[in-house]
Amino acid sequence: MVAMASPEEVNERLAVTYPGARAELDFTNAFELLVATVLSAQSTDRRVNAVTAVLFPAYPDAAALAGADPVAVEQIIGPVGFFRNKTKAIIGLSRAIVDEHDGVVPDTLEELVKLPGVGRKTANVVLGNAFDVPGITPDTHLIRLANRFGWVSSRKPDDVERAVGELFPPEEWVMLCHRVIWHGRRCCHARNPACGACVVSDLCPSYGEGETDPDKAAMLIREPRA
């Protein structure tokens, strides 16, 4: 039987360590968060934020983006990668929001995943952070850490979403995901995790996969972005 880090204690320690944990995409409303999350696929939040700082003033709502010239949008979002497919997706979802939802981002999983380029992960990000609807966001960090903690033995997002959801009450889901993602970005890296500087090292069945010397591990910690 694979050892499992105590879900409750891991969550409690991460809550103390990352009291300001939140989505690191910049947004002011559900539409901006939806677009930013679609753009974030295979890109960094920092790069997406730089792009949306230009995109959102030019196209502040679904109606504006629905009628946008794709070439103009491509020129703005080029740095995030896969810009042609992402342009098609964000213009398409904007048109769907205008045509099918009177310009308002829907607030249910069922309706969100019908929008172009929107899957369960993106939908749960929007639901949890824009509408306060509980959901698990199985991004690469959550998948990695949930496996290292022994909470699940699968890399499939649906399996991770289900397994983690069963370990915690719904009211903890959104903040848990933020905390685990922050820990994954700052300490429990994909390569050479900072085991010796980890606040849950004594609970983790994967302790030793990375640097265990406290001083060397501390050098691996990445601070939150400004």
Image (cartoon, rainbow, N blue to C red):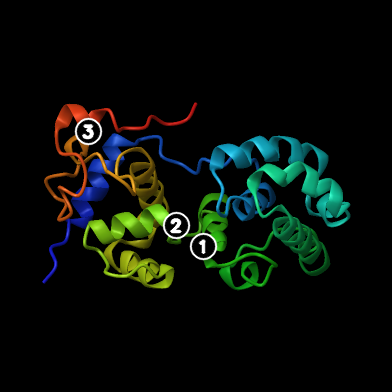
Q: Position of residue 139 (x, y in %)?
A: 44, 57
User: Pointer 3: what residue?
Assistant: 217
**Marks 1,3: beta carbons within 8 A:** no
Q: Residue at x 39, y 67 (%)?
A: 161
Q: Position of residue 225 (x, y in %)?
A: 47, 30
Determine the secondary structure under disc 2. Answer: loop
The quadrant in which residue 112 appears is bottom right
Determine the secondary structure under disc 1. Answer: helix
Q: Residue at x 57, y 62 (%)?
A: 123
119 is higher (above) or lower (below) than 132: below
* Disc number for residue 139: 2
In-front residue for pair 143/180: 143
In-front residue for pair 219/95: 219
115 is higher (above) or lower (below) than 131: below
**Relative to 63, 151 lies left or right:** left
Q: Earlier in the sequence, mark 1 or mark 3?
A: 1
User: Pointer 1: what residue?
Assistant: 121
In-front residue for pair 94/131: 94
Determine the secondary structure under disc 3. Answer: helix
Q: Is residue 60 visible?
A: no
Q: Amino acid at mark 2?
A: Asp
Q: Position of residue 195 (x, y in %)?
A: 20, 41
Q: Report the Cα–Cα distance between label 1 and label 3.
A: 31 Å
**Relative to 196, 69 lies left or right:** right
146 is higher (above) or lower (below) than 207: below
